[in-house]
Structures are given as structure tokens and as C-alpha cells.
Image (cartoon, helix red, strand yellow):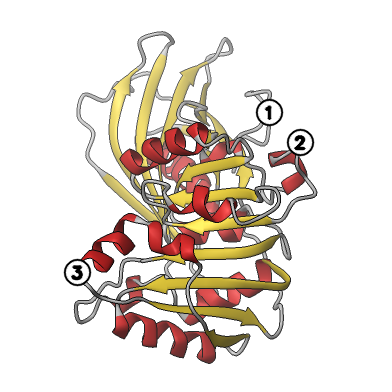
């Protein structure tokens, strides 16, 4: 089953995601590619564990979904997202039995190490989401990245590094087969938590049902009689910086469109918060009392984050600059 981020709860639980097999172990695979690993690995268990797979390639997502369905692995959830936001926001503390990373992108160029997944912050996050006895399993052909990951795990202060042989299923992936045909070997390690630090979830919520819930970021304002923009310039807003999140969020208002169904307009916004990026629509809709409602639209299944609230605030601020009088801010 393929999930959008908005289909999850924050955090979510195996009992909800896998209602028919809630008692089984729960395994997360980061970067599953075309899905070759999991059918081989699941077959080594008496009953297939519950599976959560995360991948950033849409083509790979569809290939893997077909492969797992053909193998009869129905207790599997796949999603197209960066791994860190998924683990931080969706997985509960102590929820996972294993996190599997096969042949991750090594980002080998100088200056690109900050893009690597297996750094100390990731290991601390992983340790917080693993059960006692759980582990992060890494298999890679890249010797320098392997040494880097082992050093970062040790630097995290919460992981012990065990060097072992890879599970046979890891040698059935597309990249493993490629390296095997070239006569090259692979490296494997199990990173086992020595403690389970408390890493909190963020301030992420699902778009509420019903849509007119006051929890939807919104504002109510009165537009000037002359309002009717014919030109809209891209506008950028930033905020949310803190010691824990120095980058904060960035919301870029890209364009303004006239609404075809209602009296009003729609703003397209691009919101970036660390590894999480969303494209959202923010409506400016006329109401019977003559005011206008600025509100995050449900289209596209957005999730409500500080950056999305900031985007609604940025639209409100822009309208105020155009002469609108703001009566209420709900974000």
C-alpha cells in the first residue's frame, strides 16, 4: 500500500498501519529501490514482519509496490519521502525492530558529507525509535562511506558497532548484483543502541476533518474595494529558527491565480523545512458578510507544519500590504 505523508498519524502505530498483523516485528527500509530486498529478507522469518519502506524515487516506488504485491506481502506500507522526517514524525519511540539501509548514496564529492544519511544526528534519532535489541543494518560497497558511518555511529554516543556478514537478502539488490558481477565485495555493520535517547516529534499535524475546522491555518480580513491584483511578484518569508532548528522554515509564494469556482484567488506556495518540502495552495475566498477567508486548502493532502502556518501568515501579511484590514489570525 502506498501512503502519502498526510495518510499517516504523527506519531503512528503498528496496530493502526497493520491491523491484521499488529503483533509482528516492525522493520523500516530506507531507500528500497525497486523492492528486491524485502521479499528475500521477509522469507527468512516464520511470518513476514510488518514493513515500512521509504524511497524518494517515484518510479522505484511503483516498481517496488508491484513486486511486493506479487510476492503476497500485504503487510507493507511504502511512501515517497525523505527518511529523516518520516522516522522523526511518524515512528513512535521504541516502535521499530530494525532500520535497514542498503547501498545508500555515499555523496562522495568533497563538501557533500552533510547530505549523507548516516551521520551522528541520524543515529541518535534511530536509537530513539528502536526497541531494545533493535539495530540499524548497513550494507554498502563504498569503503570510505562505511568507515564514515561507523565513525559517526561511535560519535553519536548511543550506538555500538558490530562488524558482521550481510544478510544474504542484501546481496540480491540491484546494486549488490552489479558489484558481485564485477567481482567486488561489500561491507556490513549492525549499529546497536547502547541507550535510547528521547528525541521528540515535531509540531506536525494532519489536515483536520472536517475541512472547516478552526485547526486549519486561516485568517479573516476585509479587502479594499480596489483590490484586484493584475501582477504578483514572488515573495519569500522565513521564520522558526531556534537552537534545535537553526534553518527554520522558508515559504515562497510563487503565484496568484483567480479562482474558477468561487469569488476569490488561490496562492501557490513552496514550503521548505529541513528535508521536508511541500507545495500547498492557500485560498482567498469571499464570504457572505463581505470579508474574505485566507485558508490552507486541502488539495494535495498537505500536513500542517510551522512552515505551512508561516505560508498562510505570509499571504495574510501580503494582503495587509495591499490595504486589507485583518480581523482575525488563526495560525
Q: Which residue is mark 1?
A: 213
Quick one: label 1 or label 3, which is nearer the N terminus?
3
User: Split into 4 quadrants, where in the image is the C terminus?
Assistant: top right
Report if the CB atoms under discs 1 and 3 are less than 8 Å apart.
no
x%, y% of residue 79? 49, 43
Q: Which residue is mark 2?
A: 20
Compared across the picture, whether 199 is left or right of 295 comes to: right
Report if the CB atoms under discs 2 and 3 are less than 8 Å apart.
no
Q: Residue at (54%, 14%) from the top-left corner?
A: 287
Query: Residue 58 sits in which quadrant?
Result: top left
Which marked residue is nearer to the observer: mark 2 or mark 3? 3
Q: Which residue is mark 3?
A: 182
Q: From mark 1 to mark 2, how far is it between C-alphas? A: 32 Å
Which marked residue is nearer to the observer: mark 1 or mark 2? 2
Compared across the picture, whether 233 is left or right of 63 comes to: left
Q: Nearer the viewer, residue 126 or 213?
A: 126
Considering the numbered disc 2 on the image, is that residue within a helix, a strand or a loop? loop
Quick one: label 1 or label 2, which is nearer the N terminus?
2
x%, y% of residue 149? 43, 82
Q: Residue at (63%, 85%) from the top-left corner?
A: 158
Location of residue 100 with respect to 253 vertically, above or below: below
Considering the numbered disc 1 on the image, is that residue within a helix, a strand or a loop? loop
Considering the numbered disc 3 on the image, is that residue within a helix, a strand or a loop? loop
Q: Residue at (25%, 67%) from the top-left corner?
A: 179
Compared across the picture, whether 223 is left or right of 22 comes to: left
User: Split into 4 quadrants, where in the image is the N terminus?
Assistant: top right
Q: From mark 2 to mark 3, how far is it between C-alphas? A: 43 Å
Q: Nearer the viewer, residue 206 or 327?
A: 206
Whether residue 186 can be seen here: yes
Location of residue 285 with respect to 278 vertically, above or below: above
Q: From mark 1 to mark 3, how far is it between C-alphas? A: 58 Å
Amino acid at each position: 500500500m502506498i501512503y502519502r505523508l498526510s495518510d499517516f498519524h504523527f506519531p503512528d502505530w503498528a496496530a493502526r498501519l497493520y491491523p491484521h498483523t499488529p503483533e509482528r516485528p516492525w522493520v523500516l527500509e530506507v531507500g528500497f529501490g525497486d523492492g528486491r530486498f524485502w521479499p528475500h529478507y521477509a522469507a527468512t522469518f516464520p511470518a513476514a514482519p510488518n514493513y515500512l519502506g521509504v524511497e524518494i524515487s517515484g518510479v522505484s516506488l511503483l516498481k517496488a509496490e508491484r513486486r511486493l504485491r506479487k510476492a503476497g506481502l500485504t503487510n507493507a506500507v511504502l511512501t515517497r519521502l525523505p527518511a529523516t522526517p518520516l522516522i522523526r514524525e511518524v515512528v513512535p519511540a521504541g516502535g521499530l525492530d530494525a532500520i535497514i539501509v542498503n547501498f545508500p548514496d555515499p555523496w562522495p564529492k568533497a563538501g557533500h558529507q552533510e547530505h549523507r544519511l548516516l551521520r551522528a544526528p541520524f543515529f541518535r534519532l534511530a536509537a530513539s525509535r528502536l526497541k531494545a535489541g533493535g539495530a540499524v543494518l548497513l550494507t554498502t560497497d563504498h569503503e570510505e562511506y562505511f568507515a564514515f558511518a561507523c565513525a559517526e555511529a561511535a560519535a553519536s554516543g548511543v550506538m555500538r558497532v558490530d562488524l558482521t556478514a550481510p544478510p544474504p537478502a542484501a546481496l540480491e539488490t540491484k546494486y549488490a548484483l552489479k558489484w558481485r558481477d564485477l567481482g567486488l565485495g561489500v561491507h556490513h555493520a549492525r549499529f546497536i543502541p547502547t541507550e535510547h535517547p528521547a528525541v521528540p516529534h515535531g509540531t506536525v499535524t494532519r489536515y483536520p476533518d472536517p475541512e472547516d475546522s478552526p485547526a486549519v491555518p486561516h485568517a479573516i480580513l476585509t479587502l479594499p474595494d480596489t483590490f484586484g491584483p493584475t501582477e504578483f511578484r514572488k515573495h519569500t518569508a522565513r521564520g522558526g529558527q531556534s537552537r534545535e532548528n537553526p534553518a527554520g522554515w522558508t515559504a515562497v509564494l510563487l503565484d496568484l491565480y483567480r479562482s474558477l469556482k468561487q469569488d476569490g484567488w488561490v496562492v501557490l506556495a513552496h514550503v521548505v523545512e529541513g528535508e521536508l518540502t511541500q507545495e500547498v495552495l492557500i485560498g482567498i475566498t469571499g464570504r457572505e458578510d463581505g470579508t474574505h477567508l485566507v485558508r490552507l486548502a486541502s488539495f494535495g493532502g498537505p500536513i500542517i507544519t510551522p512552515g505551512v502556518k508561516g505560508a498562510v501568515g505570509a499571504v495574510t501579511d501580503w494582503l495587509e500590504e495591499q490595504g486589507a484590514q485583518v480581523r482575525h489570525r488563526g495560525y
